[in-house]
Image: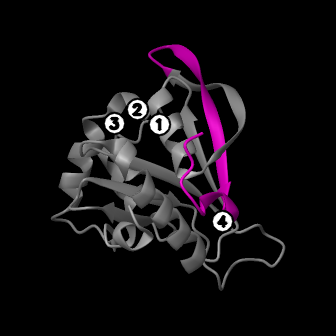
Amino acid sequence: MSATAAVAEYRIWHPTPETMPLLWEQFAKRRHLYPNGLAVDVAAFVDLMTAPDTVIYEMGDFEGVAYFTGVPDRADRPAFAEPSAMSHVLIWGTDYLKRADVARAIARDVMGRWQLRRLLTEIPAFNKMAVAFAKRVGFKEVGILRARHNIAGAWEASVVLDALASDLKEASHG
């Protein structure tokens, strides 16, 4: 897929009261992938998705979303603070690995548009497909947070990955 084709497959998305239930439905179907309770509590979900520091991108024709939390306002950012944001992707369309090029283009766009130096993501270690997807996008594993999420009474680890702009230049299959 060319970079031009990937760019045409996403747009910044502003949820409305009419579209929020569609997004909630996709998250709720995948509650087991969100151990932090996001897909359990609709009020917390709506608060996060409509927060001023959250940026949402639609992938394709509503086949998934990439959303970024903690996106700093450039005007309010202290000079000493590293400009970074947390990255999250949910794809419900088919062939999710083929969406890595689009996710990479989105990551480059959000980094450039908000002048970010780093994107971070934290994925439950049991979600090996999501970790593989993040690496395919260009994220690099930086560590493991042990006993991070309480899932059905058991404490589970998370994999922490990050990406700098230089990591997102070309396809990465590692």
Residue at horizontal 57 percent and vertical 20 percent from the top: 156
Closer to the observer: label 4 or label 2?
4
Residue at horizontal 57 percent and vertical 49 percent from the top: 172
> Which sits earlier in the primary sequence, circle 3 or circle 1?
3
Residues in magenta, as a range? 151-174
* Residue with the mark numbered 3: 40
Determine whether the residue tagged by mark 4 lies in a helix, strand or loop.
helix
* Residue with the mark numbered 4: 165
The Cα atoms of the two marked residues, 1 and 2, are separated by 9 Å
Residue at horizontal 35 percent and vertical 39 percent from the top: 39
Q: Is residue 167 magenta?
A: yes
Q: Looking at the image, which is closer to me, 31 or 108?
A: 108
Determine whether the residue tagged by mark 3 lies in a helix, strand or loop.
loop
> Which sits earlier in the primary sequence, circle 4 or circle 3?
3
Closer to the observer: label 4 or label 3?
4
Q: Looking at the image, which is closer to me, 18 or 130?
A: 130
> Which sits earlier in the primary sequence, circle 3 or circle 2?
2
> Which sits earlier in the primary sequence, circle 1 or circle 4?
1
Q: Are marks 4 and 3 in contact (CB under 8 Å)?
A: no
The image shows residue 111 at horizontal and vertical percentages of 59, 70
Q: Looking at the image, which is closer to me, 1 or 109?
A: 1
Residue at horizontal 37 percent and vertical 51 percent from the top: 99
